[in-house]
Amino acid sequence: MKAPAFEYHDPTTLAEAIALLCRLENARPLAGGQSLMPMLNMRFVQPDHVVDLNRIAELSGIRVLPDGALEIGAMTRQRDIERDARVAQACPLMVEALAQVGHRQTRNRGTIGGSLCHMDPAAELPLVCAAVDAVVRIAGPGGEREIPFAEFPLGYMTPAVGPDELLVGLHVPAAPKGQGHAFLEFARRHGDFAIVAVAVLLDPGPDGRVARASVALGGVGPAPLRLAEAEALLRGTAVEDDAIARALATTASLDPMEDALVPGWYRRHLAGVLLGRALGIARERMA
Amino acid sequence: MSERRITLAVNGQRHDITVPVRRSLADALRQDCGLTGTHLGCEHGVCGACTVLVDGRSARACLMLAVQAENLAITTVEGLAPDAAMLHPLQQAFANNHALQCGFCTPGMLTTLVELLAENPSPSAAEVRVAISGNLCRCTGYETIVAATLEAAAVMRGEAA
Amino acid sequence: MSVFGQSVMRLEDAPLLRGEGAFAADIDFPRQIHMRVVRAEMAHARLVSVDVTPALDLPGVIAAWSAADVAEVPPIPFRATKVRGLEPYCQPILAQGRVRYVGEPVAVIFAEDAAVAEDAADLVLVELEELPALLDAAAEPTDFDATRNTEPTIVRKSYGELDAAFRDAHVVVALDLAIGRHSGVPMETRGAIARYDAAQDVLELHGTAKKQHWNRDEIARLLGRAPSSVHLFEGHVGGGFGVRGELYPEDLLVCLAALRLRRPVKWIEDRREHLVATNHSREQRHRIRAAVDAEGRILAIDNVFFHDQGAYIRTHGARVADMSAGLLLGPYRVPAYRATGHFRLTNKTPAATYRSPGRFEGSFVRERLMDAIAARCGLDRVEVRRRNFVDVSEMPYARPLDALGTDVVLDSGDYALLLDKALARFGWDARVADVARRRAAGESVGLGLGVFVEKSGLGPSDGVRMTVDATGAVELVTGAASVGQGVETALAQIAAAALGVDYRRVRVVRGRTDRIEFGSGAHASRVTVMSGSATHQAGLALAALAKQTAAALLQTPEDALEIVDGVVRRVDTPEGASVTLGEVARALAPGTKLSRDRATPGLTVESWFHSDHMAYPYGVHLAQVALDRGTGQVKVEHYLVGYDVGRAVNPMLVEGQIAGGFAQGLGGALYEEFRYDERGQPLSTTFADYLMPTIAEMPPLDILVTEDAPSPLNPIGVKGAGEGGTNAVGAAIASAVDDALGGRGQVTQLPIMPRDVLRFLAEGAA
Ligand SMILES: Cc1cc2nc3c(=O)[nH]c(=O)nc-3n(C[C@@H](O)[C@H](O)[C@H](O)COP(=O)(O)OP(=O)(O)OC[C@H]3O[C@@H](n4cnc5c(N)ncnc54)[C@H](O)[C@@H]3O)c2cc1C
Ligand code: FES
Ligand code: FES
């Protein structure tokens, strides 16, 4: 289980990195390596060139904007985000989710950008970004572009980042006052990728009722899934038990992925169970 | 095959080595620096046996390239004991509490827990459990490792064990 | 105070804690090259051709072989089986004609660097013509080759009037039960480093474990060398658990290469290889029936089972099936019994022993049966066990059965007493009440139990050589091996207690064939019993020799002397004249006057211990579980292992064995399984798919070690402690989950998957 041979490049600026990606055939950016390195060691991927992003200082860091929103660089380590008080303030959902991303040792290296670009269907961070309506910034030879996270997944483990592009950062809107959040997942063993994960946000309006609900599921489709119907059913309610029940009923029509180890019905069932629990928790936290 | 000359700073010592760029940090430590205390149990990031400290933070040495470790301070299990006569308090507590059997997982456990205790000198049992939840041990059933860590923490705080 | 029985610290720890161990991958020799195995990618196929030439073209590649290149090496033989006719099912070191499981070695590459060897392996062209894969051992056998089918043998054992018992039974309870495929999966993968020392004409194999002497003899035979010109060495071993240290194709391939290529050859298994290449275990399906009288007493058991051996028969022969047949009955009195074990091959990784082999399976089956009998007879689950126990007054209890080639004679044990102690310690009655209260509040909680008899100390013989040198240091050379469980400390304690020295003065030399002629290694919980008894005897003999010699030196009668802390002195005047053991050794050095009276000089003895029977430790496992009714997750809330080990040499080590063994049992009960798709492709090939328990899965575990029934079969009363933590975990957790589900007998399969629990909950509600 040794990685296949490749050429190694360690640019120190974003521009240099993009130039390398434009010039080289079959090149692969290397972020925290917590997904790419196992894939290399197992020879699931065989790039001719590895472009290491770890020496590009401009790609990491957390900034708070005047409106309280966060700008997070793609190369920011998961553990630095997890322990940042400003993130806890602006996006408590992300902190709660991060505690379930692998282990301390993997979060010390793993980056937020790497997780988004790897885009495992059950990964926590893409699910959080889907739930909070993050905006991602992508740089390429022609400059930078911004797209809403909803447009970022193109398919199974396929982000909207071209071969000569890089994800450079993301914009996370600040949680409105009084927002209730919950992140729950089910894995057979601690620290593993979830079978199903659920992220819920409930924003209260002036009347104390839900003004905006965000419900996102991971592990059900190839990429995070927002349950628009459930969100609509929750809007305007006080998240009473029967409102939760109506929202849960929408999971019955899910048609989850199926594989040799996990049947589709079980994912659907878990989605309902976890969503019910998450809504209960978020309701408690909504103020 | 692409190679690079690099300098690794391991346990405070410089190692000037030439490695294929594809070589993992773990393999470089073992083969090029002669430090075989860092073990490989899976080479895909799950078992934690290869855990080393990179600038004080625990990381899987099987998931880093050796060339990435240039200019970073690496600590391996060989760097924990102060000298040939004394053990690190954690090592001593592991022995006292029978926290190792075959000893294969032990280096990764120790480095992970050194980081924990540096960050949190008075962890609860629950916090210790979370800290080593990414380290597999097939021999001990884990509980003695928690006991050892709590004992070491007390010793390191200057309290008698 | 004797060091025997004390929880003293281990002698093994210091190098392991400092990262100074010598595990297989840590061993290097100058000029070494690396071996990489090309493995079959189909479960069952005709092997049309193997072309290694593209690999040979890669710079750094030294050689590449397929089956034709190693045709003169016979397949890997059996160590332990009395069953005849199994030879045609042995595994060749490289596949010939057919491949029979994904992972089967097809070719090997030798290169200057491990990564280059892997690059080259990817270039080997293997042409396969897929054949249908057989994946269910309970299905009709198919063809193994042109003349044989996939059922090499049927293991049969029986005694008593079975038919009459079933005819007269008050009730007959019948169950269909299955145990999943899982295995030892030590944290260290296998490794083998061979070196041919031409100067001395000696072939060395390093990185070995468990069975050095037998493996040495076989390697020598298969490669056509004298055994005395082949030596095996054991360094540190990162867990054994049954799978490590068997003779595998790779061991022979590195040896052959070292001889042919005249360079040291290193092979380190990677984890994905390990999960498809190293022995699997456990997979078995039992159709079991019990005839029971009106009081819930067993009249007869009929045990029909299907053993999934995987693609080939490895070194163990039919041993696991043999034990599944011969040791199933555990602690119960069963007047009539019949076992019919269909020993069958499938297109999966070959299987063999894993900690508590045949017994983890058997205990699950037997204890599920006991729960079912209780339910059918309207009896309490604890009571039905009590009624069927072999009583302490019946010990030793001979069963008209054999296992592992010896008659099953339960040597000692008070099963009812241990059950009482365990229930009291666990707080069973209080928990029964608590569970009832929580159930009334809507929770799904349950209690379960499993009672079992282990086996240990398989004979027939074991020897050690014990020597005191001129400095008073003691060397104990044993043919036993260590797989990391603390063998050195335990043997040093026994030696120290018998001789009268500090145990830290005893150096234990194990696992190498160049220091002792014979050895049985480390398996089947035999080291403490067999090697421990030999050590004890050696220690006593050495003490006698030391006293005899000291008597001459001190002009004192022998029986007035004692040895304390390495000093021979008078019992009545400890402060008086004395000699150290080092001085005694010097007095016996070659050429001295005293040494001439003896056959050999030196303060040294060799001692052998023989035993025809096994010692049977026994235990009780108790579990409390709660089910998550939404996800189906099983949470073990509390667990107790009660285990009688006869006598504990070092209680701390015994508890360590039990805790670690429990974790492995837990894996087999709830998490671990080697899964395959319908074409026989393995699905559990990484640690992200093969789920071993982390600390987060470990419940609060209580351990009760008792010493109520020392073994009468050996001078120190010990029974092996290595497997009791694992034995009944599947049984007790299944019992508890079933109880939480309402005691309907729905749990018939291990591991218990969350989605199965959901299904059971739904069935129960319907
Ligand atoms: C034991 C273990 C458990 C884990 N458990 C979880 C878990 O529970 N949940 C979870 O979500 N993850 C889990 N992971 C994976 C997680 O740790 C990774 O951090 C994450 O998936 C990838 O992030 P990375 O920074 O390591 O990226 P890398 O592995 O370096 O890269 C991942 C992919 O993204 C591409 N890429 C990276 N950065 C960029 C960029 N800026 N622009 C364009 N492409 C880029 C790479 O080319 C590569 O294809 C686990 C990993 C391990 C080893
Ligand atoms: S070897 Fe690195 S995590 Fe297992
Ligand atoms: S002590 Fe053997 S793996 Fe932990």
Image (cartoon, coloured by chain):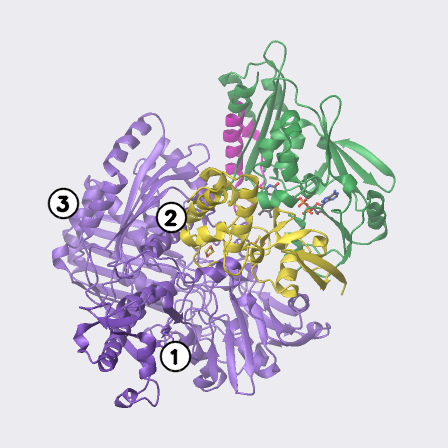
Chain colours: A green, B yellow, C purple
User: What residue occupies the far left of the structure in this picture?
Assistant: C393
Q: Are marks 3 and 1 in contact (CB under 8 Å)?
A: no
Q: Residue furthest right?
A: A142
Compared to residue C483, the image places residue A40 above or below, namely: above
Residue that label 2 marks: C749
Residue farthest to the top? A207
Q: Secondary structure at mark 2?
A: strand
Residue C181 x, y percent position in the rendering = 43, 55
Residue C477 lies in quadrant: bottom left
User: Mark 1 Cα within 10 Å, few/some/many (few <14, many 20+)?
Assistant: some
Q: Quadrant of residue A174?
A: top right
Identified by mark 1, the residue type is Ile
Q: Nearer the viewer, residue C409 or C737?
A: C409
| Label 2 vs 3, first from the N-terminus | 3
Tell whether position A58 is magenta. Answer: no
- Is residue C314 visible in the rendered image? The answer is yes
The answer to whether residue C611 of the structure is visible from this angle is no
Which quadrant would the C terminus of chain B be assigned to in this image?
top left
In this figure, which residue is indicated by the disc labeled 3?
Answer: C294
Please check whether the numbered discs 3 and 1 fall on a single chain: yes
- Residue C150, percent from left and from top: 42, 67
Q: Which residues are magenta?
A: A251-279
Q: What is the number of callouts on the image? A: 3
Contact, mark 2 vs mark 1 (Cβ under 8 Å):
no
Q: Is residue C363 left or right of residue B114?
A: left
**Chain ID for label 3?**
C
Q: Earlier in the sequence, mark 3 or mark 1?
A: 3
**Residue wearing tag 1:** C516
Residue A253 painted magenta: yes
